[in-house]
Image: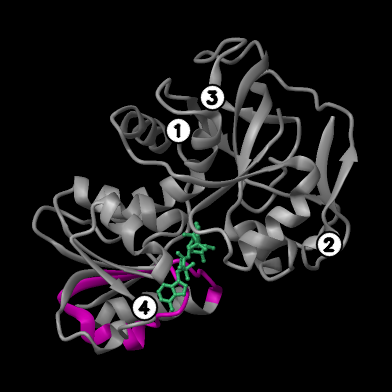
Amino acid sequence: MRKVLYNRFGDEQVLEVQEQPTPTIAKNQLLIQVKATSINPLDWKIYRGEMKLLSGSKLPKGVGIDFAGVVAQVGPGVTRFRLGDSVFGLLDVFKGGALADYVVVTEAVIAPKPAAISFDQAASLPVAGLAALQIVDQLAVIGRGHEVLINGATGGVGMFAIQLAKKRGARVTAVVGPAGVQRATQLGADVVIDYTKQDVRQLTQQFDAVIDLSDKLTFKAAKKLLKPGATFVNTLPSPQSLVLSFFHNLFSSRKRKILILKPTAAGLNTLASFAQDGLQIPVEQVYDLANVRQAYQETSQGKVKGKAVVVLG
Ligand SMILES: NC(=O)c1ccc[n+]([C@@H]2O[C@H](COP(=O)([O-])OP(=O)(O)OC[C@H]3O[C@@H](n4cnc5c(N)ncnc54)[C@H](OP(=O)(O)O)[C@@H]3O)[C@@H](O)[C@H]2O)c1
């Protein structure tokens, strides 16, 4: 089977499509024939070596976390899935390897693909959708009537965060680039701010939650946008930021939370039911496996607004 691997850390030129033996499964595992994978910023942060503390330095490594495909083999200990089922899910974030014709998984990290969405859309959901779900429901705990600011609202995580925050009854202010203004409105944002025209740090309004998905808004800058008791969320865990936020939260009513993605089948099933009910999953760009370097070059340079998918066939 084909699999994308790299043998040294670096830019997308390190990525190579190689022939590998099809993996075998254990009693509680399934073999999935991958139809599509989607690209996440985590992929390139890992292959560039920016997350070695969490991902480790052992090479070669596979690339890609999200996948959607069809169950090709089922171990005897598997109870919820059968041969031929269409599923979507994610691999261990720091091990990767979804850019391959086949992946081996357990039932804990997959869910049935909703009939209403394509494999490309299903592959776009796991990391970005679970991140948005965790942020909205567990970190910011967004509820009815809350004022929520989402900075970077039309990227992979942001476009789901807008829709989930609206589902929970919040009023959403979306901060986006010029190309995202129309998209943010379509996704349900109440107020849309183009960050090239207005500096979000200068807003006088205060919010119940400020969610930064751009990696550009610091807690220090966001603090004046937070009501007393409000929460700031960002997505950049590091040993230093986790310790800092722990001590900060002991003494301040304005909380600082950091996303560490926790993949669960329950979360995937929640996303699947939202998708069946009309969650918008816009796929911006589709690439073939042969163009994997181009796919990562364009997405990591911000040329793709929203989700990019690599199809395996
Ligand atoms: N910690 C975890 O477990 C975890 C899990 C999932 C994701 N993440 C992280 O979460 C972040 C978001 O992921 P993603 O998939 O949504 O990334 P993405 O698709 O690249 O989205 C980032 C968004 O930020 C916007 N942006 C850029 N500069 C901005 C600025 N100055 N002000 C406001 N917005 C700006 C971009 O808009 P334009 O393109 O229009 O500029 C883009 O829509 C990434 O850093 C990712 O690594 C972390």
Tag 1: amino acid: Ala
Q: Residues within 10 Å of mark 3 (few under 14, many from 20)?
A: many
Does any atom of ligand 1 lie closer than 8 Å to the CB of label 4?
yes
Q: Is residue 18 above or below residue 301?
A: above
Spatial CA span between label 1 and label 3? 11 Å
In the rendered view, would you say 174 is above or below 169?
below
Read off the magenta span.
Answer: 210-239
Q: Is residue 276 magenta?
A: no
Marks 1 and 4, the one that precedes in the sequence: 4
The kind of residue tagged 3 is Val
Pointers 1 and 4 in contact (C-beta within 8 Å): no
Q: Secondary structure at mark 4?
A: loop
Q: Quadrant of residue 91?
A: top right
Q: In the visual, does 165 lie left or right of 67?
A: left
The residue that disc 4 covers is: 195
Could you tell me which secondary element the residue under label 2 belongs to?
A: helix
N-term-proximal mark, 1 vs 2: 2
Residue that badge 1 annotates = 265
Task: For mark 1, give the secondary structure.
Answer: helix
Q: Image quarter for residue 24?
A: top right
Q: Nearer the viewer, mark 4 or mark 2?
A: 4
* Front position in the image: 148 or 119: 119
Which scheme is used to colour this image of the protein? one colour
Residue drawn at 63 percent across, 18 percent down: 71
Residue 247 on image: x %, y %: 36, 80
Measure the alpha-carbon separation of dots 1 and 4: 36 Å
Residue drawn at the location 47% of the way across and 74% of the way down:
215
Disc number placed over residue 13 in the picture, else none: 2
226 in the magenta segment: yes
Q: Residue at x 37, y 36 (%)?
A: 271
Work out whether mark 4 precedes mark 2 in sequence or the reverse, and give the earlier one. Answer: 2
